[in-house]
Each structure stands twice: as structure tokens, then as C-alpha cells.
Image: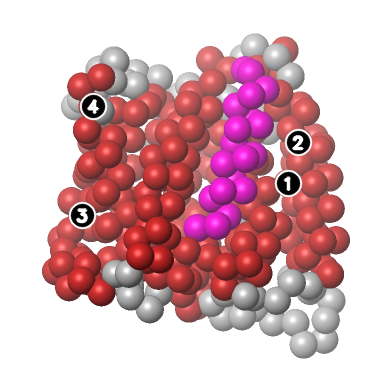
Amino acid sequence: MKRIWLVLLLVMNVLWAAAYACFKLLAPVMDAGTLATLRFGLSALIISFVWRWIPGVRPRGWDLFRTGLLGVMVFCAAPRLQVSGVQLGKAGDAAILMAFDPVIAAVFAAIFLREHVPLRRWLGFSLGLVGVAVLAEFWRPDFQWPGLVANALILASFVCESVYSIVGKPLIQKSHPLKVLAAGLLIGTAANLVFSGKDVVRSLPHLGASDWLALGYLVIICTVVGYSLWFFAVRETPVNAVAMTVFAQPLAGVLFALVLVAEPLRWSQLAGGVVIALGLYFSLPAATSRNRFAHVGADRIVGP
């Protein structure tokens, strides 16, 4: 496995962190379902346009069914849960909660893909979670989660998103990653249109230039580029190693929340970022070592 994949994913996770601020910016003009339908529908159109030039076979039979499951869970259920949680709570808090995503992915990868998670990486997970606790200032007497319902929705979305790696990894060993992504996006968009097709038509006339700019960022950077890059990395790397790069999002997320939606910045966020960086230090060097991935083919077991 080339080190470049983890470096690119670290950069991508910084860019993904801005998505939470985009959700907040778009909240006045569209609900979670409308945003999910537009975002992933436009992404599906872009990737489908280049379908004929993508090499390899498309998912068929049982693999197509699992691609459909991936599409509905990741591109229909997950964004509706996540956007609803962000719009109910705060963009910065949503990015902080994102630190639980790698842990969920690692546990599911160990169960369904039979991946071995080294002790060093569990230490990295632990430090990452400690960093999140520092970011949230858990020691304050008035500490409380900003909204139980909002956080529950966001955490539920992470469970749905884990399907992308756990179900997707076996699929991309047989079919080209972009064809799996395109098929998943099309099926997910079909499900979204069932629930929000009329709302999309009503919302389009009310979108301004800044709304289209935020939506374009979500479509091109966060979806087409981001989800493609994730699949290419997961094809060569254990899911639990790739998932560690998500710890770059909490600190970047609170900075984007400060700049884009004027949420205040606290000193604890810097301290928490340092602890998260230590967690990445303990996890990623082991993940990029060539000899540690000599067994990468062994974890290509079909998921649920």
C-alpha cells in the first residue's frame, strides 16, 4: 500500500469537514431529504456521464443487490439522518462527533471483514476519542450535549455510512470502484426521489448563487472526488486503517464552523486537536508500512 493514499485521505477529510458548515448554510432553503436528493442525484449524473469510459465490469446479480443496499443506506438513509442532526444541532459539534465514525468502522471491519486491528491502532483510536472529549470540554460543570436527538441522528448516520466500506470493499474487488459508486448513487437517488422528488422541484427556484456554490462543493468535492478516493484507498488498505484518517475532521470542522457560520472557537479545541494528532501518529505509521500490508488480500471476505 502506497503512503500517498493515506496522505490524500487526510487532505480529503479536511475538505469533508467543510460539509457540516454547508449543511447549516443550506438549512434555510432545503430540508435534509431535498439536500440529499440534489447532492447525490447531481453526483450520479456526473459519474454516469463518464460511465462508458470506465473500464471493468459492472455489479451483477447478488453484487448488484448489495450495491443497491449500499446506495440506499449510504446515499439515502445516512445523509437524511446526518443533515437532520446537523441542522438541529451545531456544525462544530457534528464534526466532533465524526470522531466516533472510525471506531464504528473498525469494529464492523473486524466483525464482517475479519480484519485484524493492531494494538497500536486501538491506542490511536483511544487518543482520538480523548481528543474529542477535550474538544467538547467535558470537565465543565455546565457540560451537556447540545441536543440528544441531534447527536443520536448523527451517530445513527455513521452506522449507515459504515456500509460503504464494509459492503463496498468486497464489491470493488470484482468491479471497478467508479462503477460500484455510480450504481450505488443511481439506486440511492431513485430512493431519494420517492421521498423528496416534489420537494426538490419546489426548492429549485429559491436557490441563490451562494446556495448553488455550497451545493456544488458537496457534489464535486465531497461526493464525486471524496467517495471515489475512499473506494480506491479501501481497495488496497484495511478499512480500520483508512478510517483513522477521519480523525482529521473534528479540528478542521470547528475551524470551518468558525469561518463559515461564525460559531465561536475555544482554546480546548486546540488542545483536543493536539491529542487527536497524537492518535494519528500512533495509528498511521503502522498503517503505511509495506510489510504490515502483505496480508491485505486476506481481508477480502464478503461482508453482510
Q: Which residue lies under the disc numbered 1?
A: 125
The residue that mark 3 highlights is 191
Whole-Å distance between the Cαs marked 2 and 4?
36 Å
Report the Cα–Cα distance between label 1 and label 4: 38 Å
Give the magenta range.
1-19
- Front-most of residues 303 and 272: 272
Upstream in sequence: badge 3 or badge 2: 3
* Cβ–Cβ under 8 Å for marks 2 and 1: yes
x 76%, y 36%: residue: 283
Amino acid type, callout 2: Ser
* Quadrant assignment, res 32: bottom left
- Measured as percent of width and height from the top left, residue 166 is found at 46, 37
- Closer to the chain start, of discs 2 and 1, is 1
Q: Which residue is mark 4?
A: 51
The residue furthest front is 209
Q: Is residue 106 visible?
A: no
